[in-house]
Protein backbone atom coordinates (compact mmCIF):
# COMPACT_ATOMS: atom_id res chain seq x y z
CA UNK A 1 0.00 0.00 0.00
CA UNK A 2 1.35 3.45 -0.89
CA UNK A 3 1.98 6.16 1.70
CA UNK A 4 -0.90 8.17 0.23
CA UNK A 5 -3.23 5.18 0.50
CA UNK A 6 -2.31 4.85 4.18
CA UNK A 7 -3.14 8.54 4.73
CA UNK A 8 -6.41 8.19 2.78
CA UNK A 9 -7.43 5.23 4.92
CA UNK A 10 -6.91 7.29 8.12
CA UNK A 11 -10.17 8.99 7.21
CA UNK A 12 -13.08 7.06 8.81
CA UNK A 13 -15.17 7.51 5.66
CA UNK A 14 -12.49 5.93 3.48
CA UNK A 15 -10.95 3.43 5.90
CA UNK A 16 -12.97 0.55 4.44
CA UNK A 17 -11.30 0.82 1.02
CA UNK A 18 -9.05 -2.08 0.05
CA UNK A 19 -5.44 -1.32 -0.92
CA UNK A 20 -6.34 -1.57 -4.62
CA UNK A 21 -9.42 0.63 -4.20
CA UNK A 22 -7.47 3.28 -2.28
CA UNK A 23 -4.77 3.35 -4.95
CA UNK A 24 -7.41 3.44 -7.70
CA UNK A 25 -9.08 6.45 -6.09
CA UNK A 26 -5.72 8.20 -5.61
CA UNK A 27 -4.92 7.68 -9.30
CA UNK A 28 -8.03 9.70 -10.16
CA UNK A 29 -7.14 12.59 -7.85
CA UNK A 30 -5.13 15.67 -8.67
CA UNK A 31 -2.05 16.21 -6.47
CA UNK A 32 -2.11 19.82 -5.20
CA UNK A 33 0.12 21.85 -2.88
CA UNK A 34 -0.47 25.03 -0.88
CA UNK A 35 1.85 27.44 0.93
CA UNK A 36 1.33 28.84 4.41
CA UNK A 37 -1.69 31.18 4.44
CA UNK A 38 -2.82 30.16 0.96
CA UNK A 39 -6.52 29.54 0.43
CA UNK A 40 -7.41 25.90 -0.15
CA UNK A 41 -11.20 26.52 -0.38
CA UNK A 42 -13.11 29.80 -0.19
CA UNK A 43 -16.47 30.28 1.51
CA UNK A 44 -19.14 31.12 -1.07
CA UNK A 45 -17.24 29.71 -4.06
CA UNK A 46 -18.90 26.97 -6.11
CA UNK A 47 -18.21 23.55 -4.61
CA UNK A 48 -16.87 21.17 -7.24
CA UNK A 49 -14.39 18.94 -5.42
CA UNK A 50 -13.30 17.27 -2.21
CA UNK A 51 -9.78 17.68 -0.86
CA UNK A 52 -8.01 14.99 1.16
CA UNK A 53 -5.12 16.28 3.26
CA UNK A 54 -1.98 14.19 2.72
CA UNK A 55 0.58 16.37 4.54
CA UNK A 56 0.35 19.49 6.67
CA UNK A 57 -2.48 21.24 8.49
CA UNK A 58 -5.31 23.59 7.55
CA UNK A 59 -7.64 25.93 9.41
CA UNK A 60 -11.35 25.80 8.63
CA UNK A 61 -12.95 29.24 9.02
CA UNK A 62 -16.33 30.82 8.69
CA UNK A 63 -15.81 34.56 8.49
CA UNK A 64 -13.22 35.48 11.16
CA UNK A 65 -14.06 32.44 13.33
CA UNK A 66 -11.81 29.38 13.22
CA UNK A 67 -14.02 26.28 13.35
CA UNK A 68 -11.37 23.56 13.22
CA UNK A 69 -7.76 22.65 12.60
CA UNK A 70 -7.36 19.54 10.46
CA UNK A 71 -4.38 17.39 9.50
CA UNK A 72 -3.42 14.41 7.35
CA UNK A 73 -6.28 12.06 6.54
CA UNK A 74 -9.00 14.70 6.90
CA UNK A 75 -11.31 15.50 4.03
CA UNK A 76 -12.59 18.99 3.34
CA UNK A 77 -15.25 20.12 0.93
CA UNK A 78 -16.71 16.62 0.69
CA UNK A 79 -20.27 17.97 0.49
CA UNK A 80 -19.38 19.31 -2.98
CA UNK A 81 -19.28 15.75 -4.28
CA UNK A 82 -22.97 15.42 -3.42
CA UNK A 83 -24.27 18.98 -3.70
CA UNK A 84 -23.08 21.80 -5.98
CA UNK A 85 -24.02 24.44 -3.37
CA UNK A 86 -21.49 27.17 -2.55
CA UNK A 87 -18.75 26.33 -0.05
CA UNK A 88 -19.96 26.82 3.54
CA UNK A 89 -16.52 27.69 4.95
CA UNK A 90 -13.04 28.76 3.94
CA UNK A 91 -9.96 26.61 4.44
CA UNK A 92 -6.47 28.09 4.75
CA UNK A 93 -3.12 26.29 4.78
CA UNK A 94 -1.31 26.42 8.12
CA UNK A 95 2.18 25.84 6.78
CA UNK A 96 2.95 23.81 3.66
CA UNK A 97 0.15 21.45 2.61
CA UNK A 98 -0.01 18.59 0.14
CA UNK A 99 -3.43 17.29 -0.77
CA UNK A 100 -5.36 15.13 -3.20
CA UNK A 101 -8.35 16.68 -4.97
CA UNK A 102 -11.24 14.62 -6.34
CA UNK A 103 -13.83 16.46 -8.40
CA UNK A 104 -17.54 15.67 -8.59
CA UNK A 105 -17.53 14.84 -12.30
CA UNK A 106 -14.74 12.31 -11.81
CA UNK A 107 -16.56 10.61 -8.93
CA UNK A 108 -19.89 10.45 -10.77
CA UNK A 109 -18.17 9.13 -13.88
CA UNK A 110 -16.63 6.34 -11.80
CA UNK A 111 -19.98 5.63 -10.12
CA UNK A 112 -21.58 5.21 -13.55
CA UNK A 113 -19.15 2.36 -14.25
CA UNK A 114 -19.81 0.68 -10.90
CA UNK A 115 -16.25 1.35 -9.67
CA UNK A 116 -16.04 -0.14 -6.16
CA UNK A 117 -13.75 2.63 -4.83
CA UNK A 118 -16.25 5.27 -5.96
CA UNK A 119 -19.20 3.36 -4.51
CA UNK A 120 -17.46 2.98 -1.14
CA UNK A 121 -16.45 6.65 -1.20
CA UNK A 122 -20.07 7.63 -1.78
CA UNK A 123 -21.15 5.34 1.08
CA UNK A 124 -18.63 7.03 3.38
CA UNK A 125 -19.77 10.50 2.35
CA UNK A 126 -23.39 9.52 2.91
CA UNK A 127 -22.51 8.32 6.42
CA UNK A 128 -20.88 11.70 7.11
CA UNK A 129 -23.94 13.59 5.88
CA UNK A 130 -26.26 11.40 7.97
CA UNK A 131 -24.12 11.90 11.09
CA UNK A 132 -24.12 15.66 10.60
CA UNK A 133 -27.89 15.69 10.08
CA UNK A 134 -28.33 13.64 13.25
CA UNK A 135 -26.21 16.17 15.13
CA UNK A 136 -28.30 19.06 13.82
CA UNK A 137 -31.49 17.24 14.79
CA UNK A 138 -30.15 16.76 18.31
CA UNK A 139 -29.27 20.45 18.59
CA UNK A 140 -32.75 21.44 17.41
CA UNK A 141 -34.36 19.06 19.90
CA UNK A 142 -32.23 20.41 22.75
CA UNK A 143 -33.12 23.98 21.81
CA UNK A 144 -36.81 23.19 21.65
CA UNK A 145 -36.58 21.46 25.04
CA UNK A 146 -35.11 24.50 26.82
CA UNK A 147 -37.54 25.65 29.51
CA UNK A 148 -38.48 29.07 28.20
CA UNK A 149 -42.24 28.82 28.17
CA UNK A 150 -41.81 27.52 24.68
CA UNK A 151 -44.87 25.82 23.21
CA UNK A 152 -42.71 23.61 21.03
CA UNK A 153 -40.84 22.44 24.13
CA UNK A 154 -44.03 21.51 25.92
CA UNK A 155 -45.26 19.70 22.84
CA UNK A 156 -42.02 17.80 22.51
CA UNK A 157 -42.17 16.68 26.15
CA UNK A 158 -45.69 15.40 25.65
CA UNK A 159 -44.72 13.53 22.50
CA UNK A 160 -41.76 11.88 24.22
CA UNK A 161 -43.99 10.53 27.00
CA UNK A 162 -46.14 8.59 24.51
Image (cartoon, rainbow, N blue to C red):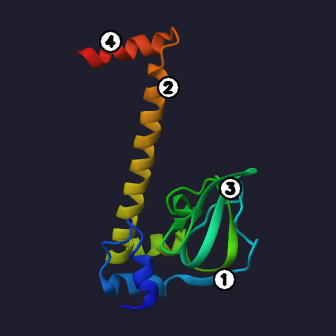
Residue corresponding to mark 4: 158
**In 3D space, how far apart are the residues under numbered discs 4 and 3 (Cα atoms)?**
39 Å
Does 34 sit above or below residue 136?
Answer: below
Query: Residue, x 76% and y 71% (percent of image)?
Result: 37
Element class at badge 3: strand
Q: Which residue is mark 2?
A: 143
Q: Sort mark 4 into few (<14), some (14-19) or many (20+) by Cα contacts within 10 Å.
A: few
Tell me the distance, in whole angstroms, between the alpha carbons under discs 1 and 3.
19 Å
Q: Is residue 102 above or below residue 79?
A: below
Q: CA distance from mark 4 to mark 1?
A: 54 Å
Q: Is residue 147 visible?
A: yes
Percent x, y for residue 105? 53, 71
Query: In the picture provided, is 27 more to the left or to the right than 127?
Result: right
The local secondary structure at tag 1 comes to strand
**What residue is shown with label 1?**
33
* Quadrant occupied by the C terminus: top left
Amino acid sequence: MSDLAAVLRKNPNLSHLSDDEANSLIARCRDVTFSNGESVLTEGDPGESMVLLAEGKVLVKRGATTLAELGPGATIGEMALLDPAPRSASVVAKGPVRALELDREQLWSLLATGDSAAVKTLQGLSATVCARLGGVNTLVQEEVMRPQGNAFGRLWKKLRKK
